[in-house]
Image (spheres, helix red, strand yellow):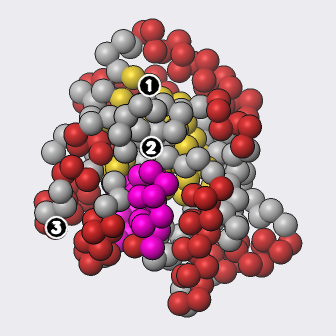
Amino acid sequence: MKLLGDYHTHTTLSDGHSLLEDNVKSAVNKGILQLAITDHSFSHMAHGITREKFEEQKKEINELKSKYSNIQILHGVESNLMSLEGDIDVKQNERENFDILVVGYHYTYKPLSFKNFFNFWLPSVLHITTKKRVQKNTMAYINAMQKNDIDILAHLNYGIKVDPVQIAKVAKEKEVYIELNAKHLGFSDKQLLEMVETGVKFIIDSDAHYCENIAKNNMAFAAIERLNIPKTQVVNLNDFPKFKNYNKDKKY
Ligand SMILES: [Zn+2]
Ligand SMILES: [Zn+2]
């Protein structure tokens, strides 16, 4: 199985270990045709990219685009899901400025308020997995999709437990891709098959923090084979994805 693109990768501007250009070189060597750079966004306490660096990164990407004409480089961010209401750390007016919005939960996000600390940050850090909490977490992702123009939901079930099938139903409606992440593939086979039934589209990402890991994802490849997931439902095995700010004319 071969990917056409990898849409979730990190550089030294967040917690990645490779320079942006090394990510691009590695992607070119692997023969993929699109690469997105998606560092952790602004409220990630330890490793978030600053807004200033994000602008510098954009300039660097624009320069690299002319140097590497055989690959399309997309600029994006991995934003933090930060509340039960679906808040993320990218403002509405910033959304226009980049190509691809990946959203994931990380316990390292900076709590928004006292209330947010107690109703979302702390229960998540304590790994509370009661039915009620799982439903709240599920609604947090659904609210995030209703509120924001999200392209990819990253590593569901990593950090907080959710019902991925409920999320998949809304993701299909909102044309959001569900990620099959190389390191955190948090779905049971049963859940994956039920998600397939919803008609949602998956996207395979490496979440590479080292450039050599770009386009690698053996866990996703194995799950697709094992469960006979239709390849037509995994967007980057066939085609370039449609993102809300890039390739808008493509079909979901
Ligand atoms: Zn992540
Ligand atoms: Zn990541």
Residue for point 59% across, 89% down? 132
Front residue of 191 and 47: 191
Q: Position of residue 167 (x, y in %)?
A: 47, 68
Name which of mark 1 and mark 3 comes first in the sequence: 1
Residue range of the region highlighted in magenta in the rendering: 166-187
Q: Is residue 209 magenta?
A: no
Name which of mark 2 and mark 3 comes first in the sequence: 2
Nearer the viewer's eye, disc 2 or disc 3? 3
**Quarter of the rendering occupied by the C terminus:** top left
Q: Position of residue 250 (x, y in %)?
A: 37, 34
Residue type pointed to by label 1: Ile
Q: Is residue 174 visible?
A: yes
Q: Which mark is residue 237?
A: none
Relative placement, left or right, of 11 versus 214 is right
Find residue 211 and report its image quarter.
top left
Q: Which mark is residue 8?
A: 2
Q: Residue furthest top?
A: 66
Find residue 33 and report its image quarter.
top left
Could you tell me how far apart the alpha carbons at marks 1 and 3 are, in whole angstroms? 32 Å
Front residue of 95 and 81: 95
Q: Is residue 66 above or below residue 21?
A: above
Q: Which residue is mark 3?
A: 227
Could you tell me how far apart the alpha carbons at marks 1 and 2 are, in whole angstroms? 12 Å
Q: Which residue is mark 1?
A: 73
Could you tell me how far apart the alpha carbons at marks 2 and 3 are, in whole angstroms? 24 Å
Residue type pointed to by label 3: Leu
